Image: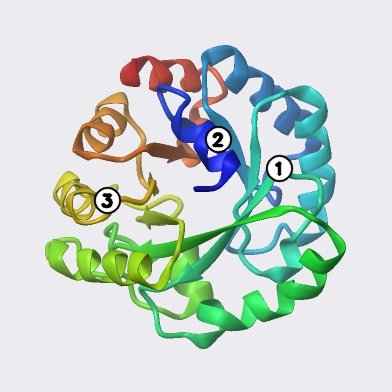
Amino acid sequence: MSSVLERLTASAPGLLVLLDPGRTDPPDAARVARAAEEAGAAGLLIGSSFDGVEHTGVVAAAIKKATNLPLLLFPGGAGQLTPLVDAVLFLSLVSGRNAQYLIEEHVRAVPFFARHPIEAISTAYILVDGGSITAVEAVSQTRPLPADKPEIAVAHAVAAQMIGMKAVYLDAGSGAAHPVTPAVIRAVRRAISLPLLVGGGMKTAEQVRAARTAGADLLVVGTAVETDGADRIRDLVAALA
């Protein structure tokens, strides 16, 4: 397992706060990062499925200056890579069949990793239908897996584990109408031994708690914090205690 991932999965209650550099300026990012640390979050993600490329580095720098929490990059493509993070979720969109997000962006990233000795965490990224068209679907031009057929998500996750990936990320997409269902999370958790991240559409303490109870190791929230402010982090962390 990744050393950064080990640290995160060992940090109860396992909440990760996602910051979009395209919608968050450096001072606000620093404020949210400090609030996340004070509230007991496990770590931070930075990244976007759309835009944000030119701001990723400066926002990451502000976050690193403000907090000691682990910072992982959640890149929408190789153009968002920055050395100012602790690790990169090296995402392969295994639920889709668009070669750009299965392997091409990874090939483009090789020169970056040759220059910067940053940990790359091979992660199977699985988009699950969250009831609305999200930026991930629009940008990647891939359809999400059906939310009412857990066995399809299971097959993708197991294939990723067999290939040798180090983590699985189930995502309903930023701003999804509803999160990945507990049934899907539970089925995937039973089928794999890899760390399991779940994000997208979680807006309430009940939804975060349900995902954790179903078997998620790390819960990712972003839109809820953007909408309700940094104080919302404390409520979500408390729901997992």
Mark 3 surroundings within 10 Å by alpha-carbon count, few (fewer than 14), some (14 through 19), many (20 or more): many
Kind of residue at badge 1:
Asp
Q: Which of the numbered marks, if any, corresponds to residue 166?
A: none
Residue at 27%, 28% in the rendered image: 209
Q: How many marks?
A: 3
Residue at 40%, 23% in the rendered image: 13
Image coordinates of residue 194 in percent, x first then y, are 36, 51
Image coordinates of residue 241 in percent, x first then y, are 34, 15
Task: Classify 97 as above or below 114.
Answer: below
Q: Which of the numbered marks, if any, corresponds to residue 226?
A: 2
Q: Distance between the residues labelled 2 and 3?
A: 20 Å
Q: In which quarter of the image is residue 238?
A: top left
Task: Classify 44 as above or below 89.
Answer: above
Horizontally, residue 16 falls left or right of residue 205, namely right
Kind of residue at badge 2:
Glu
Q: Which residue is label 3 attached to?
A: 180
> Which numbered mark, 2 or 1, is in the foreground of this view?
1
Q: Nearer the viewer, residue 87 or 223?
A: 87
Mark earlier in primary sequence (1, 3): 1
Secondary structure under the numbered disc 3 in the rendered image: loop
Image coordinates of residue 214 in percent, x first then y, are 20, 39
Task: Classify 229 as above or below 143.
Answer: above
Mark earlier in primary sequence (2, 3): 3
Residue at 74%, 74% in the rendered image: 110
Q: Nearer the viewer, residue 167 or 151?
A: 167
Q: Which residue is label 1 attached to?
A: 86
Q: Which of 139 and 39 is in front in this view?
A: 39
> Which numbered mark, 2 or 3, is in the foreground of this view?
3
Secondary structure under the numbered disc 1 in the rendered image: loop
Q: Do the residues labelled 2 and 3 touch (CB within 8 Å)?
A: no
Kind of residue at badge 3:
Val
